[in-house]
Amino acid sequence: PGGHRRFARSTILGLLPTSRRERPTLERLGETAEHMTSVYRRRLAQACNGLGWVGRLTEEELTPLREQGRRIAGSLLVLIDAPLDHDRQSALGEARSAATEYGRIAARGSAEIRETVEAFLRMRMLFLGELAQVSRRRGLDTAEATHLLVTATQAIDRLLVALMHGHETETAKIAATRGTA
């Protein structure tokens, strides 16, 4: 009655491409780590605009920060695509190590904790913004896009804590060295 039609859920799901029913990964979406990294690098200079402490650093002082930033971004991309929890934890450990070292380097470069966190938050928005763009370009549904962004956000939040720990540890070490000099 009324011309309504009913379809079995399994029939509809069978029409969807297999990848749409699996956890979204950058690889499955056709995005490469190299592409994500290149977009990130292009926008990084703009994101760091107005960060006084970064502008005061020499090229020699910036190099280790860039290296740690690349380690962080690369590890996050591995974490997003890792099929197993063990692999995700390993990638998170690598990213934490890089974030801790980033905090130490920033402290040695005379950046205050507030300035270091501000730089990290700007870089965080770049990374998440690019993931959102990927979600739009690849037509992810709301659940898939949310999963991708939540996964990245939870990992990045842990990295922020590691960054602050590294900064605080290095600041204390510098203060102790100055106190004994």
Image (cartoon, grey):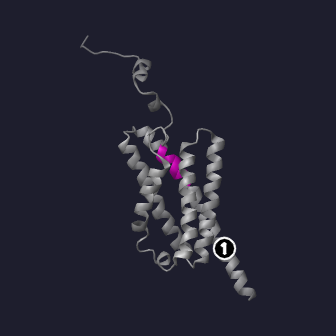
Determine the residue located farthest toward the right in the rendered image: 180
User: Which residue appears farthest toward the bottom when viewing the image?
Assistant: 181
Reply above or below: 81 against 109. above
Identity of the residue drawn at 56% across and 68% down? 65
Residue 98 % position (x, y): 61, 61
Q: Tell me residue 72's x, y (percent).
A: 56, 58
Residue stretch in magenta: 148-155
Would residue 46 be found to the left or right of residue 71 on screen? left
Looking at the image, which residue is at 53% across and 72% down? 62
Can you say whether 180 is above or below 155 in the image?
A: below
Q: Quadrant of residue 86?
A: top right
**Which SS class for mark 1?**
helix
Given residues 74 and 149, the one toward you in this image is: 74
Image height check: is 24 above or below 163? above
User: Which residue is rendered at x = 50% and y = 32% of the image?
Assistant: 22
Residue neighbourhood size for the residue with mark 1, other residues' Cα within 10 Å, grouped as few (<14), some (14–19), many (≥20): many
Q: Quadrant of the C terminus?
A: bottom right
| Residue at the limit of the structure toward the left, as seen here | 2
Residue 73 is one of the magenta-drawn residues: no
**Residue 11 image-quadrant placement:** top left
Q: Amino acid at mark 1?
A: Glu
Q: Which residue is mark 1?
A: 170
